[in-house]
Amino acid sequence: MNNPYSAPGAAMSDVSPGDQTYDPSMFAFSGRIGRVRYLGYSMGLSILMMLAVGVLGAILTMMARTAMREMGFLVLLVYIPLFAIHIILAKRRLNDLDQSGWLALLVLIPFVNFIFGLYLVFAAGSDGENGYGPAPSKNTTGVILLACTMPIIAVIGILAAIALPAYQTYVNKSRAAAHAQAPAPDAAPAELAPAPDATQAPDTAPAQPQPGAPADPQR
């Protein structure tokens, strides 16, 4: 018989249910992720995509006889799974915002996907547990480093897009100015007739009269 006056046997915990967290995984299909993890996971997947496309391109270059249709099919085999993973990451980020994961399909709409991407990056997630599970744990150092590389690469890309056309314009103007300031080539000297050879005896034979010409009266 249980003693109604005995101490409770349940273990006491200092963490309330609303403060519980979990450790997210990059390749999981569910579970909330915050802004930093969303950037870091997206950057990590982008690096994987570039590596996969680079390896695939090297293989196709070695296989010179591969048809263009087969090459496009192989590239799709790489892009489709990675695109699906990006959709899953957007869904998990929406769950962190206590929003339905179906809103991730907004990435398929032009112009809207840009604003939607900014919302995923800058909107703060729910504090504590929400309708989609507990909050994610603190970000690791690797996640923070991956997240920091994305804006750096974006800034470098923007600067390169501005600087390269300007540099090409400067090179073209420099070449045009150098061509305009170059002196005109000197005219080629006229071809001189060959000088007579002094060692050759002059031709002293009398000229033969032309037919029909008057005879020389001194003869």
Image (tube, rainbow, N blue to C red):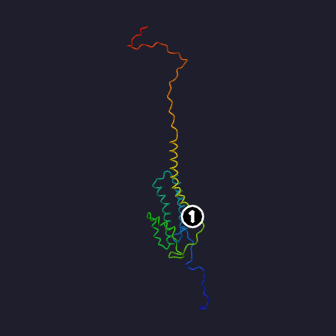
Which residue is outermost to the top? 219
Q: Quadrant of the N terminus?
A: bottom right
Which residue is outermost to the left? 212
Residue on which disc 1 sits: 148
Indicate whether 18 appears above or below 115. below
Give the amino acid at mark 1: Cys
- Residue 116, percent from left and from top: 47, 67
- Residue 8, percent from left and from top: 60, 87
User: Between 194 and 73, which is closer to the camera in this rendering?
Assistant: 194
- Residue 112, percent from left and from top: 44, 65
Indicate whether 164 appears above or below 138. above
User: Between 140 and 196, which is closer to the camera in this rendering?
Assistant: 196
Q: Is residue 173 left or right of residue 8?
A: left
Q: For label 1, count other residues whose C-alpha is less than 10 Å away and answer few (under 14), some (14-19) or many (20+).
A: some
Which residue is outermost to the right? 7
Q: Quadrant of the C terminus?
A: top left
- Residue 47, percent from left and from top: 55, 61
Q: Residue 110, located in which quarter of the rendered image?
A: bottom left
| Residue at left offset 57%, top offset 64% | 148
